[in-house]
Image (tube, rainbow, N blue to C red):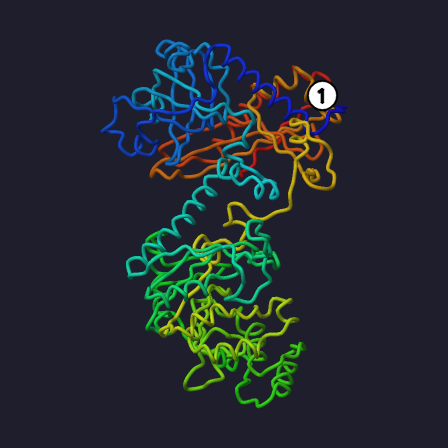
């Protein structure tokens, strides 16, 4: 029975890679040269094969698959654009040469999956017909010291995925594609607004006073000024100052920080598009926001239909528009605006099973809307007619001063943006703030401090103005069809963490207290993906031993159609059970590409045959006292 700590194989594999780094330096090769000489991206070579066949190119990227077979070696190289095969032949590959950093065939044992490499050669096809670069020169641009997750089975542990999103993006093409689309959303927003005459400004993230919204702020101390400041909960007040300065259409895509809860749809740090338009009111923004969503849908995603929380959302038709009071009355049969006192409104709430009493009729209406209506707004809907009590920065409706010139965007039951005609009467603004403000409500994040500097701006005069504020993360969730905000934030906020393997390999002390103390170890299940050669070395060196003497080999197969039309891919790995408790150890390396759809029955048969001919015999030879069993192949 093994007594090795769970991180021993990972630490040992790291040491093996470091020895390869040392060997490269002995040969005069730089394991981390400062530049590359790429001439073509992978996708360009694949898409323009007929024009490039026989020409000399240089491709560079991360090696995701690597195998040697007699006098040849094959690798799959992935770059920003896609994946391409490189082929290295003993008789045509340049020998190892420190002058140009080339690695010869005799030294290809220095190469591992995960290395950043460069191949120079001729564009052609292999005997199987796969487009490849037949390399005459091969270089290592960055030696990977740690093993990557298997490209095709990917990370499985949710904690590791969130903490090491870069590994998730490397191993899961869908993750990488999703975040590329999210990045393009911001570009589409800028194109849309710039095309309508808006100017983008940077507004402060560190602010002397928070405002423009209702939320608990993050505090910070500015040493140079010797004062407390706040991270922005909104950028609205600064955009309005720009309007007063004479810029009629302005916007920012800013970062926002609200020291409140974390759940599947809320994150303390997020992005928002905030615009301000002079000489217009909130009705102008209803059309603006509709057009902006359609522009993003068509320009970034090329479609109008999206599946959000199990609902098919159509951004094509004109959006629904309805007042909050009408929607509540339609859903509950109660017209809250008929009530003359909070007591009457609260009695109506109680009749709906909502027992938390509100301070005004308007706030009771909002509470009923949140409980009974919000989740029913599936197709894109613009809800207007908000009570002025909850809209301190908005102008009241001329036809009914109880309501504000304001609307919110709802899609798939989620609030996706808040918009209104801005209050530009400094006297009314001050009265509204004073009526809503007290220290208890401010501490709870219900109101914000009175901003006298902004009132001074209004007293100099600000034209009629309206603004929108859709959240970037909410838009990304909708357009990428995700239900958890953590799946559209590349670097989500999480508690500090040091893994056991990092504490071991970097020689870190145990967690302590005080300045500079290391965060505690939070041990989770280890995931380790090895080549068959690496696995064999671990068995020979005694780094891996079965816990009970029984080893299970479970083949997993994944089939899909590649981004290139008419190209189907099969990739497989073997999960090994019986070694380290709570750890996932896999042997990688099976892959196949075809111009015809691949069948699970055929490819799984090949995967099982490979296990019987190579993996099982190796385990039985190196662990003669263990019982090894092969399970049925599983589709992943």
- Residue 248 percent across, percent down from the top left: 32, 66
User: Residue 14 sits in which quadrant?
Assistant: top right
Residue holding disc 1: 626
Secondary structure beneath dot 1 equals loop
**In the depicted structure, whether residue 210 falls above or below residue 371:** above
- Residue 91 percent across, percent down from the top left: 36, 9
Q: How many labels does the image show?
A: 1
Residue at coordinates 47% horizontally, 81% vertically from top-left? Answer: 403
**In the depicted structure, whether residue 397 falls above or below residue 520:** below
User: Residue 633 sits in which quadrant?
Assistant: top right
505 and 350: which one is in front? Answer: 505
**In the depicted structure, whether residue 449 falls above or below residue 634:** below
Q: Judge the density around disc 1: few (<14), some (14-19), many (≥20) Cα neighbours within 10 Å.
A: some
- Residue 200 percent across, percent down from the top left: 36, 56
Q: Which residue lies furthest to the front in this view?
A: 225
**Viewed as shown, does residue 416 lie left or right of 352?**
left
- Residue 208 percent across, percent down from the top left: 53, 60
**Viewed as shown, does residue 569 lie left or right of 572?**
left
**In the depicted structure, whether residue 443 falls above or below residue 269:** below
187 and 391: which one is in front? Answer: 391
Q: Quadrant of the C terminus?
A: top right
489 and 595: which one is in front? Answer: 489
Q: Quadrant of the N terminus?
A: top right
Residue at coordinates 33% horizontally, 24% vertically from top-left? Answer: 58
Residue at coordinates 47% horizontally, 28% vertically from top-left? Answer: 64
């Amino acid at each position: 029975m093994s007594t090795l700590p769970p991180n021993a194989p990972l630490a040992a594999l790291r040491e093996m890679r470091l020895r390869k780094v040392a060997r490269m330096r002995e040969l005069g090769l730089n394991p981390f040269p400062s530049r590359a000489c790429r001439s073509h991206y992978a996708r360009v070579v694949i898409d323009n094969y007929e024009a490039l066949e026989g020409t000399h190119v240089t491709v560079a990227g991360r090696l995701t698959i690597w195998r040697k077979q007699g006098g040849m070696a094959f690798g799959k190289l992935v770059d920003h654009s896609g994946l391409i095969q490189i082929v290295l032949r003993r008789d045509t590959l340049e020998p190892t040469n420190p002058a140009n950093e080339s690695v010869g065939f005799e030294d290809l044992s220095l190469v591992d999956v995960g290395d950043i490499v460069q191949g120079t050669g001729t564009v052609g096809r292999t005997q199987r017909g796969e487009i490849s670069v037949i390399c005459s020169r091969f270089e290592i641009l960055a030696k990977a010291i740690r093993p990557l997750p298997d490209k095709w089975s990917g990370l499985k542990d949710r904690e590791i995925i969130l903490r090491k999103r870069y590994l998730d993006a490397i191993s899961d093409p869908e993750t990488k594609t999703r975040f590329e689309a999210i990045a393009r959303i911001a570009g589409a927003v800028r194109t849309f607004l710039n095309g309508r005459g808006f100017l983008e400004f940077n507004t402060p993230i560190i602010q002397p006073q928070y405002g423009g919204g209702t939320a608990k702020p993050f505090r910070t101390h500015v040493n140079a000024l010797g004062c407390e400041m706040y991270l922005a909960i909104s950028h609205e007040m600064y955009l309005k100052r720009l309007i007063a300065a004479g810029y009629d259409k302005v916007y920012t895509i800013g970062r926002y920080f609200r020291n409140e809860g974390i759940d599947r749809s809320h994150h303390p740090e997020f992005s928002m598009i905030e615009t301000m338009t002079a000489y217009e009111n909130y009705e102008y923004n209803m059309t603006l926001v509709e057009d902006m969503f359609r522009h993003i849908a068509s320009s970034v995603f090329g479609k109008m239909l999206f599946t959000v929380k199990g609902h098919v959302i159509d951004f094509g038709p004109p959006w629904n528009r309805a007042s909050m009071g009408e929607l509540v009355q339609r859903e509950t049969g109660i017209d809250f605006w008929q009530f003359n006192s909070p007591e009457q409104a609260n009695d109506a709430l109680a009749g709906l099973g909502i027992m938390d009493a509100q301070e005004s009729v308007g706030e009771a209406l909002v509470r009923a809307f949140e409980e009974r209506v919000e989740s029913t707004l599936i197709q894109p809907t613009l809800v207007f007619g908000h009570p002025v009590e909850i809209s301190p920065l908005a102008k009241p409706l001329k036809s009914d001063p109880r309501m504000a010139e304001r609307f919110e965007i709802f899609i798939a039951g989620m609030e996706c943006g808040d918009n209104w005609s801005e209050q530009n009467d400094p006297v009314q603004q001050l009265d509204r703030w004073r009526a809503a403000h007290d220290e208890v409500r401010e501490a709870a994040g219900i109101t914000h401090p009175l901003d006298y500097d902004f009132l001074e701006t209004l007293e100099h005069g600000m034209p009629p103005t309206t603004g929108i504020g859709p959240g970037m993360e909410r838009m990304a969730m909708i357009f990428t069809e995700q239900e958890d905000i953590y799946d559209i934030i590349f670097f989500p906020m999480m508690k500090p963490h040091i893994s056991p393997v990092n504490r071991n390999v970097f020689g870190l002390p145990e967690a302590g207290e005080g300045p500079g103390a290391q965060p505690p170890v939070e041990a989770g299940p280890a995931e380790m993906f090895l080549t068959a050669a690496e696995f064999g070395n671990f068995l020979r060196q005694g780094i891996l031993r079965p816990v009970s003497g029984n080893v299970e080999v479970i083949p997993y197969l994944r089939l899909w159609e590649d981004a290139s039309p008419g190209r189907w891919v099969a990739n497989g790995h073997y999960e090994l059970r019986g070694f380290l408790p709570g750890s996932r150890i896999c042997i990688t390396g099976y892959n196949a590409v075809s111009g015809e759809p691949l069948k699970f029955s055929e490819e799984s048969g090949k995967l099982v045959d490979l296990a019987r001919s190579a993996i099982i015999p190796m385990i039985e030879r190196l662990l003669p006292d263990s019982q090894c069993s092969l399970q049925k192949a599983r589709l992943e």
